[in-house]
Amino acid sequence: MPETGNGDTLTVTDNRTGRTYEIPVNEGVVRASEFRKMKAHEGDFGLMVYDPAFTNTASCRSAITHIDGEQGILEYRGYPIEELAEQSSYLETAYLLLYGELPTKSQMDEWTHDIKFHTYVHENIKKFMEGFQYDAHPMGMLVGTVAALSTFYPDAKHVADPVSRDIQTMRLIAKMPTMAAFAYRHNRGLPYVYPDNDLSYTGNFLSMLWKMSEPQYKPAPALERAIEVLFILHADHEQNCSTNAMRSVASSEADPFSATAAAAAALYGPLHGGANEAVIRMLGIIGDKKRVPEFVSRVKSGEDLLWGFGHRVYKSYDPRAKIIKRTADEVFELTGPNPLLEIALELERIALEDDYFVQRKLYPNVDFYSGIIYQALGFPVDMFPVLFAIPRTVGWLAQWREMLEDPEQKIARPRQIYAGATRRSYTPIERR
Ligand code: SDX
């Protein structure tokens, strides 16, 4: 931390009044409320700070995930993402994100049992899903179904009760794969497959997606591990757009199912979790590595985005993209190569050499290669945001619990700069 003249403070002179203020600097931030003290005249509201899209605003203090955007570092509760992807499982990582420590063997056994206990959904959820068109986007189905799930658990409104928070946490983590798989099976006109709790969390998900007439689905270990790694990588990412939605909706003490539906809705956007779907569509439109330069020109002229590139925080290579790229090689050994990979690699090669992207610090993010793997694994493109929402559910829930337990947090309600009409009187329609 650079030394400052007067300890960790800012000295601010308001030239409108000549008054000087000492503002404390703590943990690299100043409190916006300090600026309310700066008034130009008696009765003045005081200064606000203006930060559209919160590009430079800390909304909370969090101990869950640390990102260093310049260094390309991502850590869950202090553990490097590279080590967790290599050695952990999704459920173990979920426990770590929620409770702050890696579980002991007995804690992990209990946690696994608790999750498996909640994988079923009420039979009426099937009827609810049948209301969707056959070609309904599965992410739209998931968002609607998660919100509908809140009506089955009225006890979820008791957000101040830690016991209730724990049960809803288990229900949501356990049921997301079930609802996601039901949406997939609905799109294909296939019968729903019930959870098989003899399988792992990811193995059960694959079974609910792809089991047909065989007595028990047997997931290919390499495929099961690939999904496990992808789920670990997508589990949390500090204050991203969908987590901000989760915290904001839950700050009114809405139940966690409704807040998770709001978070999933935010994730659905192409600039966020929908980018993995947009990447595949982009690669398909480019069609051949020879046409990459032509597409890059379109991006540089502002006619298109390089989907899967860029990040609000990472100004270097997204560490998750590096791991996903390595995982892709392992998957392709099983499934055969995805022809889009060649186009993606050429796109990355050209972009990383081109000043337009280098100057703007645009690198591949988590979405650039994930879709290529999902497609090689046999997932349809519109399932990609769903594959992001399932693992991110634990991140949303960890942030939700942390927000409720933070004494500084209360209902989120930003201010504004009013830029509208000045006061005026109503004019009857015959005189307009
Ligand atoms: C995720 O926040 C998270 O943590 C999200 C996430 C998570 O785990 O939760 O990491 C998951 O959402 C990853 C991002 C997936 N989205 C995409 O891949 C969509 C394409 N990327 C862009 O839309 C963009 O990079 C964002 C939205 C990701 C970040 O946008 P910012 O931070 O608001 O940056 P910006 O729009 O201000 O861009 C700065 C400059 C601009 O150029 P200039 O106006 O300065 O000339 O870079 C340009 C932008 O036009 N730019 C791009 C670009 N991204 C930024 N130009 C071309 N292609 C891109 N992808």
Image: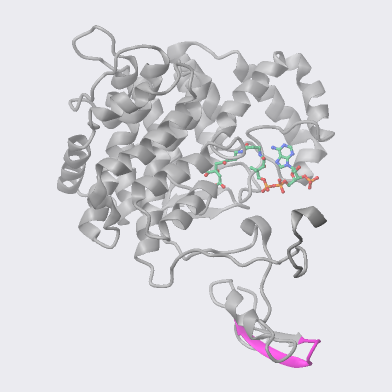
Q: Is residue 105 above or below residue 417?
A: above
Colour scheme of the picture:
one colour
Q: Position of residue 272 (x, y in %)?
A: 57, 40
Q: Is residue 202 visible?
A: no
In the image, is residue 291 part of the stretch drawn in magenta? no
- Name the one closer to the observer, 408 or 279: 408
- For the N terminus, the image quarter is bottom right
- For the C terminus, the image quarter is bottom right
Q: Is residue 148 above or below residue 160?
A: above
Residue extent of the magenta highlight: 14-24
Answer left or right for 23 relative to 137. right
Answer left or right for 336 relative to 407. right
In the image, is residue 20 part of the stretch drawn in magenta? yes
Answer left or right for 268 relative to 286. left
Q: Position of residue 158 (x, y in %)?
A: 26, 58
Q: Can you tell which quarter of the image residue 307 is in?
A: top right
Residue situated furthest front in the rendering: 430
Q: Can you tell which quarter of the image residue 285 is in?
A: top right
At 77% from the left and 34% from the top, the residue drawn is: 353
Q: Is residue 366 visible?
A: yes
Q: Is residue 212 above or below residue 358?
A: above
Q: Position of residue 402 (x, y in %)?
A: 37, 60
- Name the one closer to the observer, 413 or 392: 413
**Which quadrant does ligand 1 occupy?**
top right
- Name the one closer to the observer, 141 or 174: 141
Residue situated furthest top in the rendering: 213
Q: Position of residue 198 (x, y in %)?
A: 17, 25
**How many marks overall?**
0
Main SS of residues in magenta: strand
At 29% from the left and 35% from the top, the residue drawn is: 175
Q: Can you tell which quarter of the image residue 86 is in?
A: top left
